[in-house]
Amino acid sequence: MKRFLKVRLLPICLLLILLFQAIPVTAHGGKTLSLGTRYVSEERLYGLITPDFSVSHLYYDQLENDIQRGIFEDICGASPENCSFEVVLTELPEFTIEGNSISQEVQDAILAFVDSFVLPAYAAAFLDNPLLFWADGVSYGININIYGTLVTEIVITCMLKPFGGYTDESYEATLAELEELFLALPLHEGTTPYEWMKIFHDYLCETVVYVESTNSHNIIGPLLEGKSVCEGYAKAFKIFCELLEIPSAMVIGVGHTSVGSEAHAWNAVRMEDGNWYAVDVTWDDQESGIYYDFFLVGGETVPTYFNKIPFNQSHVANGDFYGTGEVIVASPTLHPTAYDPANAHTHVYEAEITYPTCTEGGYTTYSCACGNSYTDDYADPTGHDYTEWEIEVFPTCQGSGTLRRECLTCGLEDKIFSTPADHQYEAVVTEPTCTEGGFTTYTCHCGDSYTDDYLPATGHNYVEDSREPTCEEEGYKGAFCEYCGEGGSETIPATGHNFGEWKDNSYDTHVRYCTNKYCSAYETEEHTWEDIEIIPPGCVGGGWTTYICTACGTTKTYKKEPAYDADGNGTVDQSDVELLMSVLVGNTQAETLIDLDFDGELTIYDCVLLMQQIS
């Protein structure tokens, strides 16, 4: 047989973003998931027909934990224009980050951890829900949050890969077409699930051609385009069973024929007797006509016309969704023999109520004595009834704090970890100097400290300083920093006294004073006399001599008795004239006579002058 299942591999896009910061996280993470509730699709066909996936969710039931089931529900609740969602993981193995990078070993461990949730959920969703025809794969990114060296939170951002160019509006329009198709089926010709499934089995065989096409792997190919491969046949038959509330599953594995083996897909249906039977519309749809060799057959049923080996040998279910062994789903165990419609059983169900808990939804299980059962009457989880938050550990500057609360119903403990408290710093200011900058040292009581508020060095502020020299003391001139005293000066020699002119001080001395400012020094010495004018005494009158000090210019005059008392009788009279005349004629010598007219010799004129003085 040339027909086979084309298994679509899940494309995965991984983006690791390391956020090196501590953030508060809760014990449950930051996303509200429908944890513990079973999946009921919100996607509905219009009008009278509604696919009820509560009837068969075979692969959903095989998911191992609430995270996987939550991802399943998010995938099935998405639409072409609202196709992304986040999942937050906080209950983690110990992933340790060293330094500012993440090792390849840790990356691989984180990826494997995330894959363990996403891959099974995706496989289950696309096997259980044929209405995801608008999507073809899922990509997801991974963000990790780190506190210290430990990964405390992983945020998975998933996005379904749109397929076929659908919008929400066109998707709804396609569902309306499918509704019209199903409503047009001649189901009124049958009265039992067996007869209804045979009508649809024949409809597919009559209207579908086995051929590869864009939509041959989903329900659009066989139902709206008349083109399909085994995967499309199986999904179309499953959606029909869901509409009629007949438990069913799509089975994947390998088909073996006399000419070879190839990937293949078919259906398993649970009939009212509680047993599972196989349906392979693909192999019943032959060019020569419609066959029933693979319609509601048992595991040991041998076909009448084709491939005459037991069904379990020609159809080997392996559940390998990705073809890599990463995810293996379990297929239903078939009843050994084919279904016999003549022995159809009418179920009589007894109800068993499973009440909802804080995290798990409630439901009612309806069981028949034949072994058939189903669940219905679902109730949402009650949610936790938490106490008020109380402080378990106060935050300090050296460690984070913890808020704690507890569910009064189930005892679940919930915690919020706060960031460490701020340091309480005391500031000590170191003022800047001329040559060194200033700063403030902030010190916490825990010992942590740092410096900040830096100020530049002030630089020297030089102020000029000088003292004028005096006559006897040295002076100086320089500049010194008013803050630190840095600087220098040069010495100015004493000026020495600058005495002015000599001035008369007393009869015997003269004095001179220093003319320099603020100096009162002086010196004295005796006059140095020099005669400058001599008037000899006359015959009858005294003479005089004028003296001048050669230093200060002071003068003094000394008088002499008249020099003309030639005879020395104490009176200048005629006798003195006669004596003078006698001298002139050479009869007498008199040293006391003087040259009155200053012509250098004693003459008669001197006598005349003497006589004039007498008269």
Image: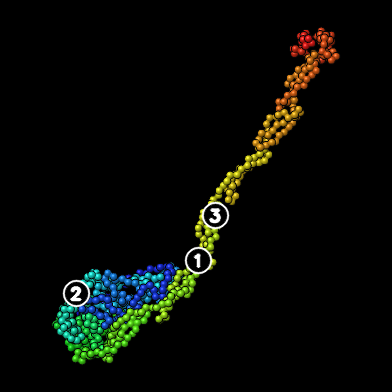
Which callout, 3 or 2, points to the residue nearer the camera?
Answer: 2
The amino acid type of the residue labelled 2 equals: Glu
Residue plotted at (39% across, 78% down) = 385
> What residue did someone put label 1 on?
423
Q: Going from the N terminus, do you reach mark 3 or mark 2 first?
A: 2
Quadrant location of the N terminus in the rendered image? bottom left
Q: Using the numbered discs, state the Cα–Cα distance from disc 3 to disc 1 in whole angstroms.
A: 26 Å
User: In the rendering, at what x and y percent does residue 357 appear?
Assistant: 36, 81
Residue that appears at 76% across and 28% down: 508
Q: Position of residue 13 (x, y in %)?
A: 32, 70
Amino acid type shown at disc 1: His
Q: How many marks?
A: 3
Q: At 48% across and 70% down in the image, what residue appears?
A: 395
Residue under label 2: 177
Q: Label 3: how many residues lie within 10 Å, few (<14), some (14-19) or many (20+)?
A: some
Disc 2 crowd rating (10 Å Cα; few below 14, some 14-19, many 20+) is some
Task: Work out whether mark 3 precedes mark 1 in sequence or the reverse, and give the earlier one.
Answer: 1
- Residue 351 is drawn in which quadrant? bottom left
The residue shown at (14%, 82%) is 288
Q: Can residue 146 be seen in this snapshot?
A: no
